[in-house]
Image (cartoon, rainbow, N blue to C red):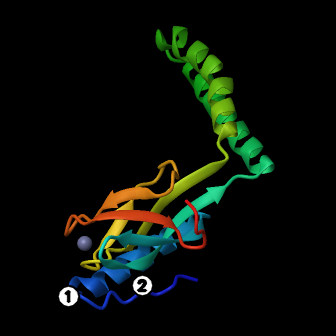
Amino acid sequence: MVEPAAAPGVAAGAGVSAAAAEIAERSAHWTDQGADRLAVLLSADGFAATTGGVFLRDWSEADRRRRAARWWAGLWALGLAFVFVPILHFVVPPALLVAGPLVASRVGAVRRTVFGGIGPCPRCGAAVVVGGGIALDWPVREACGRCYLALEIAPAGRVSV
Ligand SMILES: [Zn+2]
């Protein structure tokens, strides 16, 4: 399921196997959380592109309803719990009463969750991590945390961006 990291070939330091392990570990972690892997290329001028993955989950209509309902129920349950807390019961339950449907509608509108992405740096082979919650506005720009190479990350299967 998780492809081995592409061999960087040049300028590959001792950290490469550690990077491969980190990539495999994070990939497995996101996959366990229900994410699908989108193959991406990490490229930079003058270096051979490497292959990485961005992990995301597209929520179906049913998923979105379920997620919204869970948030709504959770917030109202919390509000109900605060009904019995002196003083706070004037503030928290009404606030959560209002927040429930508002938050639910926002959660329900989310069509895709991006967990994050990872791949080997084309120059030094270190694992480059892209944070979760990013807007997938291809190409995603990121810098290697080790050699500071500026990278562009884009889906491997698509020619246009
Ligand atoms: Zn690097």
> In x, y percent, where is residue 106?
64, 33
The foreground one among 115 and 155 is 155
Q: To which residue does mark 1 refer?
A: 14
> Is residue 103 left or right of 149 when viewed as pictured?
right
Q: To which residue does mark 2 refer?
A: 5
Kindly indicate the quadrant of the structure image that contains residue 94: top right
Question: Marks 1/2: CA distance?
Answer: 15 Å
> In x, y percent, where is residue 153?
44, 64
Residue drawn 64% across and 42% down? 110
Rendered-image quarter of ligand 1: bottom left
Q: Which mark is residue 120?
A: none
Residue drawn 57% across and 16% down? 95
Label 1 or label 2, whichever comes before in sequence order: 2
In this picture, is 110 found above or below 80? below
**Callout 1 touching callout 2 (CB < 8 Å):** no
How many residues crowd mark 1 within 10 Å: few (<14), some (14–19), many (20+)?
Answer: few
Kindly indicate the quadrant of the structure image that contains residue 68: top right
> In x, y percent, where is residue 32?
56, 69
How many residues crowd mark 2 within 10 Å: few (<14), some (14–19), many (20+)?
Answer: many
> In x, y percent, where is residue 102?
64, 24
> Is residue 70 left or right of 147 when viewed as pictured?
right
